[in-house]
Amino acid sequence: MKFGLYFGSFNPIHIGHLIIVSYIINNTDFKKVWFIVSPQNPLKPSKTLLNEYQRLHLVRISIEDDPNLNASDIEFQLPKPSYTINTLAYLKEKYPQHQFAIIMGSDSFQNIEKWKNYQQLIRENEFIIYKRPGFEIKYYYPGLIILKDAPLLEISATSIRDMIRQSKSISYLVPNKAREEIEKSGYFKKG
């Protein structure tokens, strides 16, 4: 079976993530997507991150009604910081019967050369790239699947966290269950 792997901090998960995943399931051969919640991205500061188990919980409650989606804590058991190359090696060994593709925006793909063993990553894996405004894809590789008509939403987890700190509504930006949990638990209220 083919699985799309959507790596990220999901700090918090938002509607933009879900719209991209829905588009991938409806328009590619990848009919299942795993959200790989990263406990620590080596390229991002961790001081703004909600605890990884809380972020995982927000992802789980946001997608629990969709059988095509799964929230994975696979990187919680691997050495930190989380490197995609290590996670993929683990997944391929554990699930040799499956095929995996890495889902990412063109903004993240522009930084691929900063990733650990990026040449091996590109050589050995497929990538599903959705375009982000202002971030053109400069290099094309054999394993790139470019989503040309994917919906583009200018929603960022950073702006959502800012809105929460300013006591503004985040309705319609995050899934309802995640919004309710964020409000109930007071997540992201402090800088």
Image (cartoon, rainbow, N blue to C red):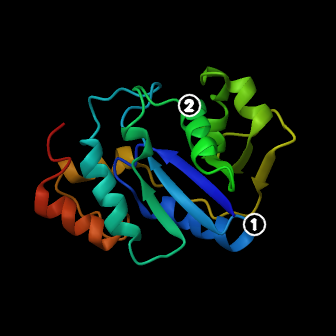
Q: Position of residue 63 (x, y in %)?
A: 41, 69
Residue at image point 30% right, 73% down: 176
- Residue 84 quadrant: top right
Residue 19 in the image, given as x and y percentages of width and height: 54, 67
Where in the figure is residue 191, as x and y percent of width and height?
19, 36
The quadrant of the rendering that contains the N terminus is: bottom right
In the displayed structure, does residue 92 sit left or right of residue 141?
Answer: left
Please give left or right for residue 84 compared with residue 39 in the image.
right
Of residues 162 and 130, the one nearer the viewer is 130
Amino acid type assigned to the residue bearing label 1 in the image: Asp
Residue under pointer 2: 86
Residue displayed at 56% across by 38% down? 90
Q: Secondary structure at mark 2?
A: helix
In the image, 164: left or right of 175? left
Question: Between tags 1 and 2, which lies in front?
Answer: 2
- Say which quarter of the image contains residue 81: top left
